[in-house]
Image (spheres, helix red, strand yellow):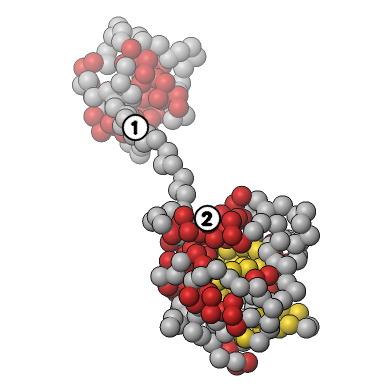
Amino acid sequence: MANFLSADRLLKALRDEGLTVVEHRSWRTNNRNHKGPIGPAHGVMIHHTVTSGTMSSVELCYNGHSKLPGPLCHGVIAKDGTVYLVGHGRTNHAGLGDDDVLQAVIAERELPPDNEANTDGNRHFYGFEAINLGDGKDPWPAEQLLAIERAAAAVCRTHGWGPRSVLGHLEWQPGKVDPRGFTMDSMRSRIGKRLGSAPTPPATKPKPPATKPRPMPTYEPFPGAAFFKSGRNSTVITAMGKRLVAEGCGRYQVGPGPKWTAADRKSYAAWQRKLGYTGADADGIPGKTSWDRLRVPNV
């Protein structure tokens, strides 16, 4: 005898089986427990919604309609394979069915014809509604069929049931045709193969290739104040002049260039003043502190 899974265990079982699961509104407390007993749990029943559109179908199964209050199942399986949980506990999905079918499900043997409606199925079955018009023409995408397989297998795996604990509404209640578009024998075969192996984890996006960190920029060390004298010719002076221009301190008519000139000295003096130096401290001859703050790149 098995109790229905708690909301947390059901959610975990579905996700562990590799399903994308959406918790819809207050699904954990959305049930019909006040209308009849719940449990023991004996199996999983598959339906089609006879609707189209994901969210409208989910809302319908959550709320129900004027003739049948919701929730109308435990989970709604969308065309893309997403499972929307809409109820937990007793739900209006199975209705009255054949007691001989129930005994066959419990014994996990071949199902007899469903020719009676004398047993409360809402009490004993998990219900999954798959979004489909049920007209035999609306397609069943591969992602949706896989999700049906995974959802049923998840519940069966957790309870220790085999694939014969899964049935269609048409195998339970006389006059029902759902699910229409695939056979329950083919689905049970798929579920059986899945239960024979470990759950397939959800697909994960490949990690992007590791990128090498950008090297830290390096700067020219201070060459000493004596370096900056008339006639000095160096690429360091060109690099310094470009940094002065970038800082808005350039006083060049042409250049900057590699030869130390009065324009370089005027430009550097502007940089010193920008840093707050005055008088003799802003004479245009670089000092170590102002040079380090200028950050002249290596050349």
Q: Earlier in the sequence, mark 1 or mark 2?
A: 2
Dot label at residue 212:
1
Would you say 140 lies left or right of 220 here? right
Q: Is residue 30 above or below residue 127?
A: below
Q: Position of residue 193 (x, y in %)?
A: 46, 55
Foreground label between 1 and 2: 2
Q: Residue at x 65, y 63 (%)?
A: 130
The answer for how far apart the CA atoms under marks 1 and 2 are is 45 Å
Q: Residue at x 27, y 13 (%)?
A: 229
The amino acid type found where label 2 is placed reads Arg
Quadrant the C terminus occupies: top left
Question: Which residue in the structure is indicated by mark 2?
Answer: 190
Nearer-the-camera pick, 257 or 214: 214
Q: Give neighbour class at mark 2: few <14, some 14-19, many 20+ (Cα, 10 Å).
A: some
Q: Give neighbour class at mark 1: few <14, some 14-19, many 20+ (Cα, 10 Å).
A: few
Q: Residue at x 25, y 28 (%)?
A: 287
Label 2 element class: helix
Would you say 140 lies left or right of 248 here? right
Residue 228: image quadrant is: top left
Residue 115: image quadrant is: bottom right
Nearer-the-camera pick, 120 or 26: 120
Q: Position of residue 95 (x, y in %)?
A: 67, 82
Label 1 element class: loop
Residue 249: image quadrant is: top left
Q: Is residue 185 above or below residue 1?
A: above
Q: Position of residue 66 (x, y in %)?
A: 78, 83
Would you say 97 lies left or right of 269 here? right
Q: Position of residue 90 (x, y in %)?
A: 58, 83
